[in-house]
Amino acid sequence: MAAHRELLEETGARAEELYFVADYLVEGKERTFTKRVFCAEIATLEERTNYLETNGPLLLGGELQKLIRQPEYSFFMRDAGMQFIAEAAVRLLLEKGILE
């Protein structure tokens, strides 16, 4: 699955399990496309020399919905769509018994 590959390439993480959260539409100047969002249970996290499109993983603690509202995150992380995705992810993780 492409999500497993992307996760490994951009974070060094190998997922034990991926859980579908949502799809969202990106309307750009040149093209429109859909992105798919997953939550993952991580089996291993390996340091990499190149994280390709990202700066690598950043492990944070706390409530997801509050974390992504912080001003140091980009507008895109703080918009209503991302808030919806964060809430959906938390609901899913609660249902799976991963969060308490």
Image: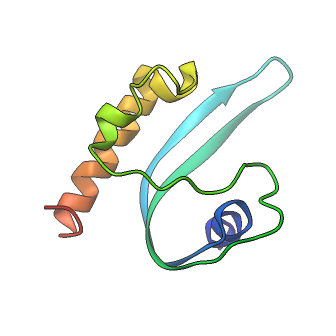
Above or below 67: residue 95: below
Q: Quadrant of residue 13?
A: bottom right
Determine whether, in the image, residue 31 is placed left or right of residue 92. right
Q: Work out whether 36 lies above or below 27.
A: below
User: Percent from the top left, x then y, of residue 49?
Assistant: 82, 67
Q: Which residue sits at x=29%, y=40%?
A: 87
Q: Is residue 16 visible?
A: no
Please provide percent x and percent y for residue 45. Answer: 57, 75
Depth check: give the residue in front, 82 or 45: 45
Instruction: State whether residue 70 appears in this view.
Output: yes
Residue drawn at point x = 48 percent, y = 57 percent: 38
Look at the image and name its color scheme: rainbow
- Asked if 54 appears above or below 14 in the picture, the reply is above
Residue at horizontal 46 percent and vertical 21 percent from the top: 79
Q: Is residue 42 left or right of residue 61?
A: right
Residue at the extreme right of the image, as rendered: 30
Q: Give me the residue at 27% from left, 43% from top.
A: 63
